[in-house]
Amino acid sequence: MNWKEVDTGFTGDFLQVEFPTATVGYVAGAPLIKTVDGGRTWTKVRAAPPVECVAMTFADAKHGVVSDYYGDAVYRTDDGGSSWTDISLGLNVPEYNVVAERRGTERPDEIVIVGGHHDAISTERPWVCPGAEDDASGTAVAMCAARAFRNVSFKRTVRFMGFGDEEGYLLGSEAYAKECAEKGEKIVAVLNADMVSYDEENGSRDDLTVGAPNDARWLVEYLKAVGGLYGQRLIYDWDAEWVSDDWSFIKVGYAALGVIEGEVGEGGILDYPWYHTPEDTLDKLQPAFGARCARDLAATLAHLAGVAGTFPEPPPLGTAAVPFTRPFAVYPNPYCFATATGGVNFVGLKSPATVEVYDLAGRRVAAAEVPAGRDECVWRPASADGETLSPGVYIYRVKGREQREAGKIVVAR
């Protein structure tokens, strides 16, 4: 019921407290410390194992086990910490990259990657690490993109990836990126998702951090442009320094970005309360928020790989931006007066361009000139004198720079 603050006399990262008896207790961290009087006074375990002790468990005052951050090094004591035996025996748990590839039809040697890391860790109890946000959410982005595009042919080769051992300092992605560079593979872009299903501002801003160095800033702007096209309404705050598995590719000269909640923008820090804890479970997440990010990344992948009508050439390193050209589209079509707001949008115009609309009798009912530098215009279904048009079928014609388009628009009440 009552608590009293105790000065242990030590400073450092204290990660776990274990009292096998009412009087004998241990605190894991750097250093490993011990009390024999119920926590009133503490001493350093001078014969402690030569690792930072992160996790531990004791059967009684004398018999216990401690391990390092990753569980690779495990030590046992049978005399209350006076001596320790290494029982890890080199039993490292290997982490593997998981790769699914769809070969490109026109430029198979050019590659676009989307992925997240499939490992997880908990600093409180390393053996209990569900990792729902960090980083099942990012892995789900790659898996959902693969499922959405399972019947789609890409012009460039696409790889859907789950990176191994990100928590071990990017070991899986580092090995993979190094191998790709040594083989001379031409990776156009890497889209990495790491913690993308938690909105720390709970809908007040809907922002994510997108990390990329200046050399890959064009890729950030491309993601923003694609996001604007498909209406997920997410805000991407650029951070030149934040990195995850994307850093492994950046180091060997590839363009890459990483998306994560928090970090910059409102709040300015990683605000996920269950980060690296056993409580990082699915019930803490906001799947609808993650789905919006997944759609933006999948759409960006589609454009970069050439399936959605655009096919950008990657710019040289150091280039600030790459021209973003939207595929030609006319929407909403059909246009319904009762439900539509605004008008009919013509996007992906190669300006200067002319947009004309005719009725089925061949009478021109609308025309618009689109100046150079713009790629869209809006037609509100009305005649040249402003009269609302009757429901029916209308014909549009678009003439632009090296562009000719024609089709039908259905107008309904």
Image (cartoon, helix red, strand yellow):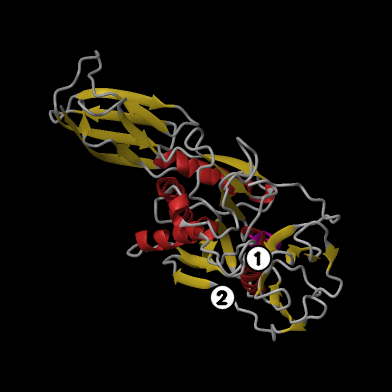
Q: Is residue 227 above or below residue 374?
A: below
**Residue that label 2 marks:** 96
Residue that appears at 85% across and 75% down: 47
Q: Is residue 143 above or below residue 179?
A: above
Q: Quadrant of residue 44?
A: bottom right
Residue at the extreme top of the image, as rendered? 385
Residue at the extreme bottom of the image, as rendered? 89
**In screen coordinates, is 341 left or right of 163?**
left
Examine the structure image and report whether residue 253 is included in the region drawn in magenta: yes
The earlier-in-sequence mark between 1 and 2 is 2
The amino acid beneath tag 2 is: Tyr
**Residue that label 1 marks:** 170
**Residue 395 at x, y percent in the picture:** 21, 34
Examine the structure image and report whether residue 377 is included in the region drawn in magenta: no
Q: Is residue 21 visible?
A: yes
**Residue 163 at x, y percent in the picture:** 56, 67
Residue that appears at 40% across and 46% down: 288
Q: Is residue 252 visible?
A: no
Residue that appears at 64% across and 74% down: 179
The amino acid beneath tag 1 is: Leu
Q: Measure the C-alpha gap from mark 1 to mark 2.
A: 12 Å
Front one among 45 and 241: 45
> What are the residue bounds of the magenta stretch?
249-254
Front one among 53 and 380: 53
**Local SS, label 2:** loop
**In screen coordinates, is 88 left or right of 378?**
right
**In screen coordinates, is 104 left or right of 262?**
left
Image quarter in which the C terminus is found: top left
Front one among 114 and 170: 170
